[in-house]
Amino acid sequence: MSDQLDNQIVKLVMCSFPDIGKARQIGTHVIEKQLAACVNLILGIESIYSWKGKIESGKEVLCLFKTTNQNYPRLEAEILDLHPYETPEILLLDIGGGSRDYLDWVFSSLASRD
């Protein structure tokens, strides 16, 4: 499966959440549904943003989802369905390099759903 990196099939999805409880709930849910191979929860970030004409700021939890091109549409749909924000941050990033063994593991963890 080492050609997965060459084809950029493995993707990273970033999404912020208002608290650890919601991040854990959605992270666990997408792992159970095999829509992501791994979810990292990064505590203690602070976001500053413009929302509806006002400058806002707040503490958030950033999640990094490791998935594949094939699973991304279902992953995005699940996040949108469960996320408490009106417009959640969902960013899809290409993986341009990394450990082939790890990237192969991501792909093989989700291969039964692709």
Image (cartoon, rainbow, N blue to C red):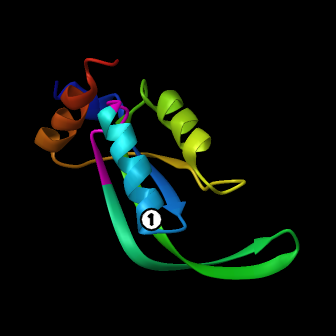
- Please indicate whether residue 71 sits to the left or right of residue 81 in the image: left
Secondary structure found at label 1: strand
Any part of residue 11 in sight = no
Query: Up-down: is 53 above or below 84?
Result: below
**90 relative to 104 in the view: left or right:** right
Left/right placement of residue 42 relative to residue 13 reads left
In the image, residue 42 above or below residue 54: above
Residue at 60%, 42% in the rendered image:
80
Residue 113 belongs to the span the image colors magenta: no
Whether residue 85 appears in this view of the structure is: yes
Front residue of this view, candidates 92 and 42: 42
Q: Nearer the viewer, residue 93 or 56?
A: 56
Locate residue 26, reporting x and y percent.
43, 48
The residue at which mark 1 appears reads as 62
Which residue is the extreme one toward the left? 101
- Taking the spot 70% from the left edge, 75% from the top edge, the residue there is 49
- Given the current orientation, which residue lies at the most extreme right position? 53
Magenta span of residues? 33-39
Drawn side of residue 12 relative to residue 97, left or right: right
Q: Position of residue 38 (x, y in %)?
A: 27, 46
Chief SS of the magenta region: loop
The residue that appears at 27% across and 39% down in the rendered structure is 37
Q: How many marks?
A: 1
What is the three-letter code of the residue carrying label 1?
Leu
| Relative image position of residue 19 (x, y in whole percent) | 48, 68
Q: Position of residue 32 (x, y in %)?
A: 31, 35
Residue occupying image coordinates x 42% and y 62%: 21
The N terminus appears in which quarter of the rendering? top left
Q: Quadrant of the C terminus?
A: top left
